[in-house]
Image (cartoon, rainbow, N blue to C red):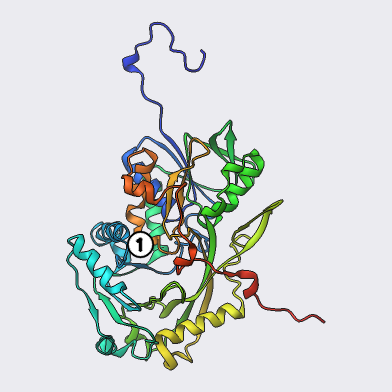
Amino acid sequence: MDIGIIPDGTDISKMTSPRRSYVIVGAGVFGVSTAYHLIQKYPDADITLVDRDAWNSDNRVAASWDWNKVVRADYDDLIYCRLAIEAQDVFKSDPLWQPYFHETGVYWMCRGSYAQDVIRNYKTLGRKAEISAVPVAEAKELYDGLFKDADYTGVTEVLINKTSGWAAAGDCLLAVTKRAIELGVKYVTQEVSTLLMDQGRCRGVCTKSGKSFTADHVLLCTGAYTSKLLELSADEAGDNNLRAGSRIVAGGITTGMAVLDDELFPQFEKMPVGFQGYPAEIGPFMGSLPPTKDREIKWWGPTIFRNTVEVTPGYQISAPPEGRDFGQWKVSKRLQEDIQAAKRLFYGKKSENWPMAKHRICWDAFTTSGDFIISPHSSAKGLYIATCGSFHGFKFFPVLGRYITQMLEGDLAPELVQKWAWDRERPDPALNPEWPRAEMNDLQDTVAKL
């Protein structure tokens, strides 16, 4: 029988519609949330989640694989404020997500109008919360003076939101992935090398081991690897329009963890998430999260960097370093000093002798505006992009899949279509404090020549 031809006498009323099929590349929050939402909406769908790391591995490259991540709705952008509140409600009420959220509050040292902008957004959305802008002198005495020795240069007021907090990120990602698999999602541990292109349509993906996976919908949730994957695919297919170009830049940031002793741990155990907020001309905001059960307190440094390499002849992009784990545990002395400087900005001299337990480089994908890309690819039918967490994607984990599903089905609200489009006018990155400005090669340890 020829494909697409219905034989005479066939009862069309008894024919079923084709089974929906999806290949989702990348098992971070964008990919897992989408798989989880799709399998609930379409229990009979063929959904394959492909990632270079096993879902239960103890060492992954996903930006969302972390000890803890901030969960907050403190945005001066009204749309992200609304979406973060939606996600936070799931974290607080859904039994799957609830065990991983900790409502410790946030303590945000604001330079400029940020606190007032956030409070205004809460009022616009009709959201009631224990949120206030506190004068600096008064704020220093809060939480038993925990942040009294912080750097308040230029700080106008401190935003306190007691309904924000943090989540045990890696454990949460593990739990939701496990639930999606139980519901019928197939998880494949393979490293995707290129897309399968056929006359302008994406049919699936090829892996480094030579395997291929096909589907009607191919969704890239590949974070910092996205530009490289599209570059390699464009080169193989001979189609320059596949390339990400200036839309996406892979960026890295260093995180550090120090061990608190028996005397210090009780002082910090119930602390809020701390933030140092800066305008774009100074640099990115920095955060410090409460200690884990292992008494390790975490914060991140002020330097966000790219790693510019030639992936194909004549084309240079930013991509994570080569290697199984993106070299995430190889942190130069210069970047370790970055962590020490950030620690002093939060805790002053009292933190000088805290023993460091870990240093790690986290990689993510960025846009010049800090907006996600959740969009069909304009030059390849069947190919969709959902990425660019820009280091603020985790908090939306519970609801990302809902909006990505809407995008796949053409039901996304017009304001989100425009905000998250593959092709849109993008602002000058100079306006984005979180834009990767440094070059990783300039931050490496120098080796003396003999």
Residue 78's spot in the image, x, y percent?
29, 60
At 42% across and 90% down in the image, what residue appears? 348
- Which element type, helix, strand or loop, lies under badge 1? helix
**Residue with the mark numbered 1:** 395
Residue 58's spot in the image, x, y percent?
50, 63
The quarter of the displayed image where residue 124 is located? bottom left
Q: Nearer the viewer, residue 432 or 319?
A: 432
Q: Seen in the image, is 205 located left or right of residue 376?
A: right
Instruction: Tell me the kind of residue under disc 1.
Output: Lys
The quarter of the displayed image where residue 153 is located? bottom left
Q: Quadrant of the C terminus?
A: bottom right
At 20% across and 60% down in the image, what residue appears? 125
38 relative to 61, above or below: above
Residue 265's spot in the image, x, y percent?
36, 85
Quick check: can you spot residue 257?
yes
Q: Nearer the viewer, residue 399 or 306?
A: 306
